[in-house]
Amino acid sequence: MIKLFASLEGEKLSIRNLKVGVILFFLFPIILIILGKSFILNNYVPFIKDYEKEEIKFLMNFLYFVGLGVFFFCNGFSDFISKKLFVNKNQLDEKIKAYYIYTLIMLSFLSLISISGLIGFLICGNFAWLSTFSLINFLTLFSYFPTERRFKKKLETFSS
């Protein structure tokens, strides 16, 4: 009984440490918005003056679909990663480590949304592009914020 209690305490401590670590992922879209706003205030000149050319439109559409593709397909990617990471994990330490890796992979994957918004902003200078994608990224991060309940649900779903 004492051993079980100690392992649950270790789990809570590990999840708490992970929560502190993922704060940087939440700051990333906010930092990009502040950076973009400072660019605008300092009279930023976009890389491409005429972004109505076909090549630039194609690039902008590609960036748009990358950002939205990550947003719409993040749950499928999450399931794929979970199936690979949580299979055959027997020890609690292994499961916690797999959850750490899973969380970091998913939050990094979601950061692609803000990165595509930043690249689009640098190309055309449209601040709405950057702020919209950063807001989508910021709000989506809450779906993967590490909690004990999500950890246990992930284990129930994908552990053998």
Image (cartoon, rainbow, N blue to C red):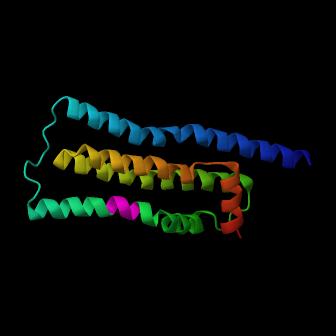
Q: Residue furthest top?
A: 42
Q: Main secondary structure of the magenta part?
A: helix
- Point out the image quarter for the C terminus: bottom right
Q: Position of residue 65 (x, y in %)?
A: 31, 64
Q: Is residue 63 left or right of residue 114?
A: left
Q: Say left or right for 92 vs 136.
A: right
Q: Nearer the viewer, residue 124 or 12?
A: 124
Left-right relation of 48 to 82? left
Residue at the front extreme, as displayed? 128
As rendered, which of 89 and 25 lies closer to the eye?
25
The tally of labels here is: 0
Q: Would residue 50 be counted in the magenta stretch?
A: no
| Magenta run includes residue 68 | yes
Does 146 sit above or below residue 86?
above
**Residue beneath the point at 32% across and 62% down:** 66
Magenta segment range? 66-70
Please tell me which residue is depicted at 21% across the width and 59% down the height of the picture: 60
- Image location (x, y in percent) of residue 70: 40, 61
**Residue placed at 58% from the left, 37% from the top?**
20
Could you say where residue 73 lies in the image, as x and y percent from the top left? 45, 66
Residue pictured at 16% horizontal, 35% vertical = 44
Q: Nearer the viewer, residue 120 or 2?
A: 120
Left or right of 56 in this view: 89: right
Q: Compared to 73, does 22 lie above or below?
A: above
Is 61 placed above or below 8 here?
below
Q: x, y percentage for residue 64?
A: 29, 60
